[in-house]
Amino acid sequence: MNKRKIGKFRISHIFIERTSQKTLSKIMSNFVPIKAESLYAMDAIEYTALSDLFEEVPWGTEIPFYNIEVTGTNVKVIKQ
């Protein structure tokens, strides 16, 4: 996996609570989390992760934020 394909995204606590473990596992299998932070004010977990779904980030630039779109078990990332 390319260490420069890095991004940030959030998953709401409600989505985690209402989604089956099997589906969550399939979604998260697209990412290698290197940091996870619970954001209580936003009721979400923010992940910094590696993924082939992300664009390559040049050294020294800010890690981009992505929206994660889930349809069934298909995952699409949309750069903000």
Image (spheres, rainbow, N blue to C red):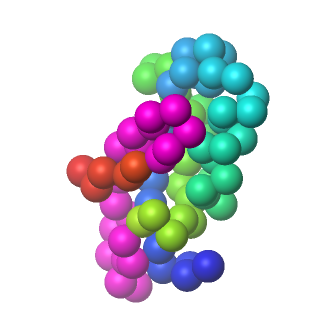
Q: Is residue 44 above or below residue 35?
A: above
Residue 34 appears at what percent x and percent y?
A: 65, 60
Up the image or down, 27 lies above or below 49; here it is above
Q: Quadrant of residue 50?
A: bottom right
Give the overall secondary structure of the magenta segment: loop
Residue 30 position, x and y percent, is 60, 56
Is 42 in the magenta? no
**26 and 55: which is toward the camera:** 26
In this view of the protein, can residue 40 be seen by the observer? no
Residue 52, x across and y down, in percent: 51, 70
**69 or 33, which lies in front?**
69
The answer to whether residue 38 shows anywhere in this view is yes
Q: Which residues are magenta?
A: 55-75
Confirm whether the magenta stretch covers residue 65. Answer: yes
- For the residue pair 39 and 19, the one nearer the viewer reads as 19
Tell me the quarter of the image containing the N terminus.
bottom right
Say above or below: 33 vs 43: below
Residue in the image at 55% along x and 81% along y = 2
Residue at 56% across, 79% down: 3
Q: Residue furthest right?
A: 21
